[in-house]
Image (cartoon, helix red, strand yellow):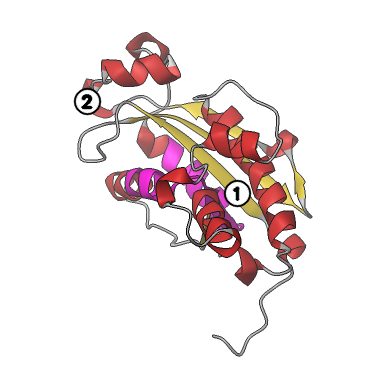
Amino acid sequence: MGFFRSPHWESVTYWVLDLEMGGLDPKKDPVLAVGMVPIRDGTVRLGEAYRTLVRPPNGGSIDPASVHAHQILWGDVKEAPPVAEVVPEIARRLRDGVLVVHHRGVDLPFLRRDFKAAGVRWPAPRVIDTARLIVRMGRMAQPDLPHDMQPLGLARARRSYGLPEYQAHDALTDAVATAELLLVLRRVLGARTLRDLL
């Protein structure tokens, strides 16, 4: 694979995704909301955004601690589409490009679980993690800086790069916030190809 040229970063479609969950345990907590927005030709395309609430399976519970963050209650999602209807929409978009998330260790286990539950093959997209890019940049700039000193939270990372603050914990707003952060990180890194961002 190393012999093949990586595509120019602007020639790739990126699907930036954020999930809101009813807790942080993929073994038991449901996905409550999905937000996705593409970056095409180096531009965030809000008109192509995808946003939906998700009805938890079997009346699944929502951790009260998570409600404090995202403000999603059972009454908000009881009429929402089930995960079996939402997963094909995510899959269709991921076939069209690279997946971008902020903290892949949080979102990917939930995605894989729900793809399996819906009987949809996980498309195994290439994944860009903006939090990992920040760590990589920190190591390049300040190799002795401890990991916990890196601005890894989305809001803190955006502030550190001069981006405006948005209301957190709305899936689509956080997807847009991550997309904007990726464009800034790409510029700071001087990334010219997709491989430079992976």
- Residue 109 part of the magenta segment: yes
Q: How many marks?
A: 2
Look at 63% across and 86% down and name the residue there. Answer: 4
Question: What residue did someone put label 1 on?
Answer: 15
* Vertical order, 24 against 131 (above or below): above
Which is more N-terminal, label 2 or label 1? 1
* Vertical order, 50 against 15 (above or below): above
- Where residue 28 sits, quadrant-wise, is top left
Which image quarter is the N terminus in? bottom right
Q: Are marks 1 and 2 in contact (CB under 8 Å)?
A: no
Tell me if mark 1 has few (under 14), some (14-19) or many (20+) residues whose alpha carbon lies within 10 angstroms of its own: many
Question: 168 or 157, which lies in front?
Answer: 157
Q: Is residue 36 at least partly visible in the picture? A: no
Residue range of the region highlighted in magenta in the rendering = 86-110
Q: Amino acid at mark 1?
A: Trp
Q: Is residue 70 at least partly visible in the picture? A: yes
Question: What residue did someone put label 2 on?
Answer: 58
Q: State the separation of the CA atoms marked 1 and 2.
A: 29 Å
Left or right of residue 12, residue 2 in this image: left
Q: Tell me the SS state at disc 2.
A: helix
Q: Position of residue 83 (x, y in %)?
A: 37, 35
Left or right of residue 5, residue 64 in this image: left
For the stretch drawn in magenta, the main secondary structure is helix
